[in-house]
Image (spheres, rainbow, N blue to C red):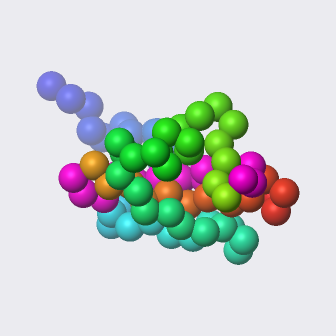
Amino acid sequence: MLNTTNNISKTEIKTPATGIIQRSNEKSFFLKFHQNSKLADHLFEPNPKYNNKAISIIQMMLINEGYILAECVNVEDV
């Protein structure tokens, strides 16, 4: 039997559990792309670039049928 009366663990959830992605940096931008696209190949490299600028991917979410929504920011803006 499980002991549910003495639960001392604490969990903090800082992102919504609604299936949405929120902007977390004022200088960030969003990209939508397919996981098998050339853009995905560039973004999943060890040092990703977009428009010949180094970027950092803050968060990403699989939205449907292999499409990804990614929040990105230029490294120089961080």
**Which quarter of the rendered picture does the C terminus lie within?**
bottom right
Q: Residue 16 placed where, x, y %? A: 42, 64
Let me know if residue 3 is in the magenta part: no
Q: Residue at x 53, y 38 (%)?
A: 44
Nearest the camera: 6 or 61?
61
Q: Residue at x 35, y 52 (%)?
A: 34
Magenta stretch secondary structure, dominant: strand
Q: Is residue 15 visible?
A: no
**Which quarter of the rendered picture does the N terminus lie within?**
top left
Nearest the camera: 12 or 74?
74
Magenta stretch in the rendered image: 52-65
Extreme residue toward the top, this view: 1
Q: Residue 73 placed where, x, y %? A: 69, 60
Q: Residue at x 67, y 58 (%)?
A: 51
Res. 19 image quadrant: bottom left
Extreme residue toward the right, this view: 76
